[in-house]
Image (tube, grey):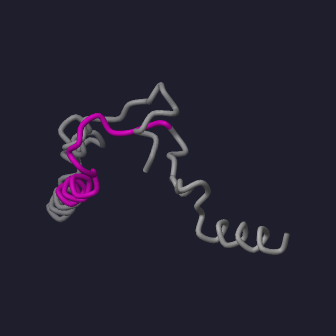
């Protein structure tokens, strides 16, 4: 009896039962990017940098009427990843991280 309990504890530590690994991370929300263009962090930082530069130049010139609109920079459709989509099958392979 003692041997069985010890082997079960060892298996729990290694997270393996019946030869299968139990550690499979899953997404919490079934949303993912449409294309595989990578992340949006670099695109967003470049767009925000351009917007800040434009605003700073116009403020320095005291030309407040030409300040850019909020949606002039950071167009989501110009990014490498064209938006996001909801996954319908919550058990698909795409739900794994």
Name the one closer to the observer, 14 or 91: 14
Q: Residue at x 23, y 51 (%)?
A: 64
The quadrant in which residue 82 appears is top left
Q: Residue at x 61, y 57 (%)?
A: 17
Q: Is residue 23 visible?
A: yes
> Which residue, as the protein is rendered here, is positioned at the far right?
1
Q: In the picture provided, is 94 more to the left or to the right than 24?
A: left
Q: Does 64 sit above or below residue 30?
A: below
Q: Can residue 75 be seen in this view?
A: no
Q: Where is residue 25 in the image (x, y as percent from the top left)?
A: 51, 53
Q: Where is residue 13 in the image (x, y as percent from the top left)?
A: 64, 71
Q: In the picture provided, is 48 more to the left or to the right than 15?
A: left
Q: Which residue is drawn at 33% across and 39% down?
A: 33
- The region drawn magenta spans 30-51
- State which quarter of the image contains the N terminus: bottom right
Q: Where is residue 73 in the image (x, y as percent from the top left)?
A: 22, 45
Q: Which residue is drawn at 29% across and 34% down?
A: 34
> Which residue, as the protein is rendered here, is positioned at the far top?
88
């Amino acid at each position: 009896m003692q041997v069985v309990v010890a082997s079960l504890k060892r298996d729990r530590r290694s997270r393996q039962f019946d030869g299968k690994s139990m550690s499979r991370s899953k997404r919490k929300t079934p949303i993912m990017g449409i294309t595989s263009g990578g992340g949006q962090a670099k695109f967003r930082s470049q767009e925000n940098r351009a917007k800040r530069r434009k605003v700073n130049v116009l403020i320095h010139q005291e030309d407040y009427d030409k300040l850019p609109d909020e949606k002039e920079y950071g167009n989501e459709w110009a990014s490498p990843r064209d938006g996001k989509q909801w996954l319908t099958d919550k058990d698909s392979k795409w739900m794994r991280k």
